[in-house]
Image: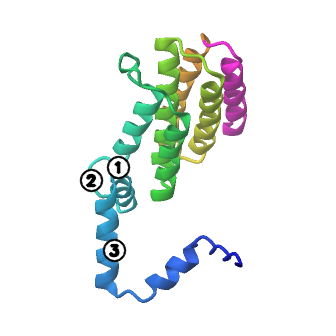
Amino acid sequence: MAKRKPKSQPKWTDVKAKLAGFDQKGLLGLVQDLYAASKDNQAFLHTRFSVGEDVLQPYKETIKRWLWPDVIRNQNTSVVKAVQAVSQYRKAAGDPAGLTELMVFYCERAAGFCSDIGYCEDSYFNSLVRMFGEALATANMLPASSRDALVARLHRVARISHSFGSGVADDMDSLLAKYQKRAV
């Protein structure tokens, strides 16, 4: 008996072709179903359409949970899930000021947890330094009125990192020095 060839995985173009047949009412119904399906979808739509008081809050809650877990409850860290929150916000809004705020918050939470708990895992540190660099680069695109306070917060993160070891402080100081050369 001959083997059946497996179908290829559906792609966006397949979905797009199906959506072309929807009328406005059908599309609204579909979006409503997606909205009801998950909190992530709700956060995405709230962010995309700037609905609600603080569209950053659900993303900050995710970052807070995964970068500063409750060690008493035996919760784990997850750099991947925290980074995903930043990525999801970027896709939903793409607002440079909001994105920079979220990245700086990420750095503050990660550094605070390391300092408070004495957590020192290389992948955690690497992610912190990477996000620190991205936050500086994104902040550099903002007007000075928004940028300066965010960069000051990153300076505080760098100061906290001096107690970590593993070259974290050196990496952050190097990134700050590059940033300051560009800002001049």
Residue 171: in magenta span: yes
Helix, strand, or loop for circle 3? helix
Q: Quadrant of residue 31?
A: bottom left
- Quadrant where the image shows the C terminus: top right
Q: Earlier in the sequence, mark 3 or mark 1?
A: 3
Give the colour scheme of this rendering: rainbow
Helix, strand, or loop for circle 2? loop
The picture places residue 41, in percent across and down from the top left corner, at 37, 58
Helix, strand, or loop for circle 1? loop
Tell me the CA gap for discs 1 and 2.
6 Å
Identity of the residue drawn at 45% across and 32% down: 66
Circles 3 and 1: CB atoms closer than 8 Å:
no
In the rendered structure, which amino acid carries the disc numbered 1? Val
Question: Disc 1 marks which residue?
Answer: 55
Circles 1 and 2: CB atoms closer than 8 Å:
yes
Q: Which mark is residue 52?
A: 2
Q: Is residue 56 above or below residue 19?
A: above
Image: magenta residue range: 164-184
